[in-house]
Structures are given as C-alpha cells and as structure tokens.
Image: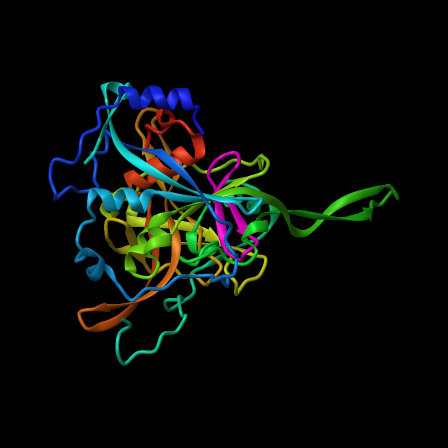
Amino acid sequence: MAGIPGLLLLLCAAVQVLPHSVHWKPTWPAYRLPVVLPQSTLNLSKPDFGAEAKLEVSSSCGPQCHKGAPLPSYEEVKQYLSYETLYANGSRTETQVGIYILNNGGRGARRQGAEPSGRSRRKRQIYGYDSRFSILGKDFLLNYPFSTSVKLSTGCTGTLVAEKHVLTAAHCIHDGKTYVKGTQKLRVGFLKPKFKDGRSANGSSSAVPDKMKFQWIRVKRTHVPKGWIKGNANDIGMDYDYALLELKKPHKRKFMKIGVSPPAKQLPGGRIHFSGYDNDRPGTLVYRFCDIRDETYDLLYQQCDAQPGASGSGVYVRMWKREQHKWERKIIGIFSGHQWVDMNGSPQDFNVAVRITPLKYAQICYWIKGNYLDCREG
C-alpha cells in the first residue's frame, strides 16, 4: 500500500464534494478514470471458514432484470467498493473507501458524487457442439497467454495479473456470508513439467519431461469487495463476484494486465477468450472463445462452453494500444458461472462474466500497486 504521508498529501490536495444530483451514475469518460482510495480500516473478528466451496454461482436475474434495477446511490457504491482483507494468519479487516475524480493531471482529486417456471435447473453450460480446446504440451502450457492461468486449491481458476497477484471470482473463496473451507491456507497452483530420470543411448543419465504437475504457492492475503459480501443474498452480488489474491512470493511468470471493459460492440469481433481448469477435464487447461450475446453495465452474457472449475478465469480480449501502435491482450472481466434467465417468458441459459468497469479497475489496480498514480491507464 502507499505510504501514509503520500496518502495524506493526496487527501489534503483533494477537493471533496458530494454528488451534484441524486441521479448520480457510476460512469466516467474513457479519458478520465476514477480513483478509489481507502479512508478507514477496522479490525474484524476471525471468520470460521465454514462455507462449502462452490465452483460456480447462479442467479435467476437475467439481463433485463439487471437493466431494470435502480441505479445505486453514491453512498451505496462506496459501500459496494469497500472491502474485506483476509490475512494468512486468519485475521481480517474491513476498509471503507472514497471515490475521487482526478483534476489537474493527477495533482488533486475531486470526489464524485426466481427461477423460470416449468424448467428444472441443469448444469449444462455446453451449447450444442463442445467448442472447448484442451491445451496440451508444455510448449503451449508454459507460454503466454496460457501460462497466466492458475488453479486455486479451492477448485477454481485464477489469472496472473501482476508479479505477486492473482485475479479470481469472489465465490471461489467466500460464499457471501463467510470464507470457504481451506481459504485460510489457500494456495495457487502453477502447471510445470514433471521430469523423470532416464538414460540416453550412450548410458549417461538425463532428465526428460514426462507429464505436467502443479507447483503450489501460498496466498498471503485476499481482498473481497463488500458488494459481494453484502449482496450475495440478492442479485446485486453477482456484479461484484471478483477477488484479488496476493502471493507470499513472486511467481516469475509473464502476467496479463487488467483493462476497463469496453462496450460489447467495441470488442474486436465482439468476441471474448478465457482459459480455465474445468472440472470435467481434471488437470487439463481448457481454452475457449465466443461472441457476447448481451451485456449490462456490470455483466457480460455469453454462451462460451464451460464447466464448474473454470470460475474465476480472466476474460480477455485483444486491445489496440494507440501509443505503441500494437495489439495487447488485457483482462476485461472475470468468468463467474451459469444462469438461467427469463427471456420474454422463455427460459434461456447463459454463462456470465463480471465486467471490469472504471470503478472496479481503479479498485483492483490500487490493490495491486498501492498508488493511484500508477492506475491512470485503463
């Protein structure tokens, strides 16, 4: 985290004003990202780690349901973006945040204001022909972008987003009420070649790659937004199904940067990609891509083939970097799970990803870097 003196300087330079209208909307122009900063931190009691791990999260509230929901107030958004931090020793804290808009090139900041009837739920998640690709062979698995996918000890998938950070789904470690079993000793697994001893034709010993195995790194701390913890009992929680894990040591692999999710019509080809450890193909990394079918401000609806275990995968696209004149893959969402939704009275199923909005980008980036000035590029 940023030092206290630097944070005090920022807050002293900030002009804090309440939103100008009760109809405040949590949106910003692309050229001016918001800033989400901690304001106060409270120590909490240790959790009991009693929840059963779930490899996906479901909701009957579909695109029209979410689009019809009332806009959150400024104070509600602040509450949703406040967060819990769980440490490896089992202690935890709750941090309240403030939301700011940068002025003057970053030298100051201004605070901105039921399941469908007649259809049983089936965990299908495969739409017609199974279009998933199993990634085999170390030449693929150990190379970017597939090497950024990791496995959580709770059974989900995560994505490397910094030297020591992994982005995943909140429900992989927290069920909305408490942390899942095993989270206190949460580990992240990296696929690596497993070598076996062999002998060459001239009799000299050698090590040759056999199969792949997971090498595990313990997690130092996790961040989960209160929007998930407070909202999981209703449909707002789906919008905040993301979490960030900090490892105890660097992983030494190339990682994928996060970015702000553009509107679906601006995605290259209208298509997204993600790789995960689907539980119907144990020990195998599975890649897929598909078109976006619908979207809300916080969610992307698609029919990428997936199975439980892929939850927490980073959803990425190729984005054009104007300054460098090149394409770059960026994570613009987190795969959450499966939904049955009511489409004009007819049940239809989708797989759902949480979009990285400008506010979520500001929050996740600050969790990673600890300095808002390093979070100006979305």
Side (left or right) of 50 relative to 270 = right
Left/right of residue 264 with respect to residue 196 in the rendered view: left
Q: Compared with residue 181, is residue 24 higher up or lower down, i.e. above or below?
A: above
Q: Residue at x 36, y 27 (%)?
A: 372
Determine if residue 94 is in view.
Answer: yes
Q: What residue lies at 21% left-to-right and 61% top-to-bottom? A: 65
- Residue 335's x, y, as percent? 39, 53
Q: Quadrant of the N terminus?
A: top left
In this view, the residue in front, 236 or 153, is 236
Q: Is residue 334 above or below residue 61?
A: above
Q: Could you tell me if residue 290 is visible in this image?
A: no
Query: On the image, which quarter does residue 325 sit in?
Result: top left
Q: Position of residue 302 (x, y in %)?
A: 32, 58
Which of the pair 114/160 is nearer the observer? 114
Residues shaded magenta: 149-166
**Res 363 quadrant in image:** top left
In the rendered image, residue 151 lying in the magenta stretch gets the answer: yes
Would you say 45 lies left or right of 194 here? left
Q: Is residue 34 above or below residue 243?
A: above
Q: Position of residue 347 (x, y in %)?
A: 26, 72
Seen at 32% across and 24% down, the residue is 323
**Residue 101: percent from left, percent from top:** 24, 29
